[in-house]
Image: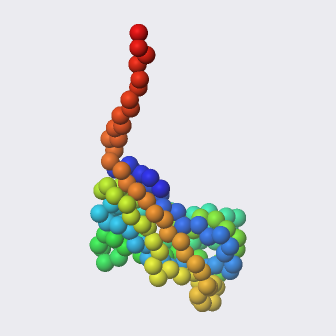
Amino acid sequence: MNLNLYDRFWFSAKIQSGKEVCGVECRIAYPPQLLEAVLDENGGVQAQLGSFFSNGSRDTTMLNANLEDDKPGTLVLGLSKLGESQPQNGKGALFSVLFKCIGVGEGELRFEQSHIYNAEAKEVPSKWHGANLQVVAINVVSAEIIPVEKG
């Protein structure tokens, strides 16, 4: 993904084939020299619940996202269905996190120590894929040579 310096973007995690999902716990590592996790007014990371947990469900789901040890570079994120909620099945977005580009270069957003849990709080096997990105300077200038007809 190519982005410009100072762009803001949502990084979304999507599940392709969830079965009996009641919770998610993950760490998202990102290059702090390129990206900044945008914080809300309470100091938490701006994140939003995806369609997977809200699709056709009246259950309440809690989403919590923070910087690990209050330092840039790693986010800790948790999602959990509350009470006697029914597990979710299918596919859709789990969550999205807001980032801002603060530096120029190439980097990766990757999942570390990420887990999906069922209603018994047992881990369900899962495979997580991150994303590569390139941030370019905001002023892009190119040159072109245009031949002139002789005459």
**Relative to the observer, which residue lies in front, 38 or 81?**
38
Residue 107, x across and y down, in percent: 39, 64
Residue 136, x across and y down, in percent: 36, 50
Q: Is residue 116 visible?
A: yes
Q: Residue at x 64, y 81 (%)?
A: 84
Against 11, is 65 above or below? below
Q: Residue at x 45, y 79 (%)?
A: 112
**Relative to the observer, which residue lies in front, 102 or 20?**
102
What's the image's color scheme? rainbow
Residue 48, x across and y down, in percent: 50, 62
Q: Is residue 75 visible?
A: no
Q: Residue furthest top?
A: 151
Against 120, is 33 above or below? above
Q: Residue at x 47, y 56 (%)?
A: 1
Quadrant occupied by the C terminus = top left
Q: Residue at x 55, y 75 (%)?
A: 128
Residue 127, x across and y down, in percent: 58, 78
Q: Horizontally, is 122 left or right of 146 in the view?
A: right
Q: Residue furthest front?
A: 150
Q: How many marks?
A: 0
Against 134, is 64 above or below? below
- Which of the 4 image quarters holds residue 146? top left
Q: Horizontally, is 12 left or right of 107 in the view?
A: right
